[in-house]
């Protein structure tokens, strides 16, 4: 049985005016194209097709809102870092994500999905900066951990936590084998139970 049996798609938006209701609490999921973000969402929510997966990187081009229960939402942000996306589209995605972090008062947390085989990129660090400006907790999923040996995965997690230096929590994750899916679900629940802080206009107006 799904942990969120009433989870459903709400709305897609390509501009802040379309973001919809801003009450309760919501947790955003971000990641580079082909990081396994959609698969992670589906595994955590225990729904095979809630977030659309594709073999084509860069498919998520909108901000997609899902209701888990009334007043609690999950937000799938556009994938970033895919080189073949036209520059104008990449710029639009960037503006859209910046606006999301600036205006959403119900934002209670951020998951950043990082392919364990590729590691952190500058674009991932930008997401940490957005979250820091909002005093928003961040949890890192080192996805596709099943592609690494046990020792490689252990060392990656150690290096990642050292790199983050307390800016975010991190864990190994695999949507394929179910590695640490329960831990990720627990982190999501903790964020959703948190009372979001209102945006500090002085810190996000850059």
Image (cartoon, rainbow, N blue to C red):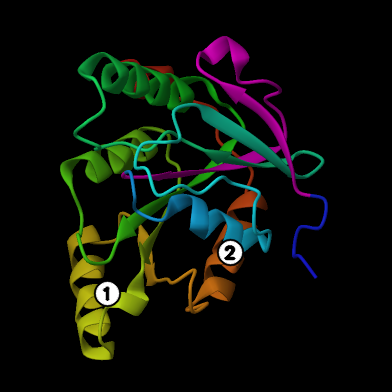
Seen in the picture, residue 4 relative to 91 is either above or below; the reply is: below
Q: Which residues are magenta?
A: 7-32
Question: How many neighbours does mark 1 have within 10 angstroms: few (below 14), some (14-19), or many (20 or more)?
Answer: some
Q: Which residue, as the protein is rendered here, is positioned at the far top?
A: 17
Seen in the picture, residue 77 relative to 170 is either above or below; the reply is: above
Image-based side of 103 in relation to 26, left or right: left
Image-based side of 117 in relation to 145, left or right: left
**Residue at left offset 20%, top offset 54%:** 120
Where is residue 47? Give x, y as percent: 68, 59
**Count of marks placed on residues:** 2
Where is residue 196? Give x, y as percent: 59, 39
**Residue at left offset 53%, top offset 66%:** 184
Residue 23 falls in image quadrant: top right
- Give the camera-side residue of 183 and 200: 183
Q: Which residue, as the protein is rendered here, is positioned at the far bottom?
A: 151
Tell me the residue that label 2 is attached to.
Answer: 43
- Give the camera-side residue of 98 and 165: 98
Q: Which residue, as the protein is rendered here, is positioned at the far front?
A: 55
Tell me the residue that label 1 is attached to.
Answer: 157
């Amino acid at each position: 049985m799904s942990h969120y049996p009433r989870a459903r798609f709400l709305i897609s938006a390509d501009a802040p005016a379309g973001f919809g209701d801003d009450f309760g609490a919501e947790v955003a999921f971000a990641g580079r194209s082909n990081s396994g973000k959609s698969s992670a969402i589906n595994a955590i929510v225990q729904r095979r097709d809630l977030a659309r997966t594709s073999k084509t990187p860069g498919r998520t081009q909108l901000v997609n809102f899902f209701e888990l229960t009334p007043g609690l939402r999950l937000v799938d942000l556009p994938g970033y870092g895919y080189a073949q996306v036209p520059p104008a589209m990449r710029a639009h995605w960037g503006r859209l994500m910046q606006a999301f972090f600036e205006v959403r008062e119900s934002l209670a947390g951020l998951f950043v999905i990082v392919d364990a085989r590729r590691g952190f990129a500058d674009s991932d660090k930008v997401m940490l900066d957005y979250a820091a400006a909002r005093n928003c907790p961040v949890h890192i999923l080192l996805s596709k951990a099943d592609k690494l040996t046990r020792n490689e995965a252990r060392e990656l997690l150690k290096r990642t936590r050292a790199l983050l230096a307390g800016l975010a929590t991190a864990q190994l994750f695999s949507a394929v084998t179910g590695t640490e899916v329960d831990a990720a679900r627990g982190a999501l629940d903790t964020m959703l139970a948190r009372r979001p802080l209102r945006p500090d206009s002085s810190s996000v107006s850059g």
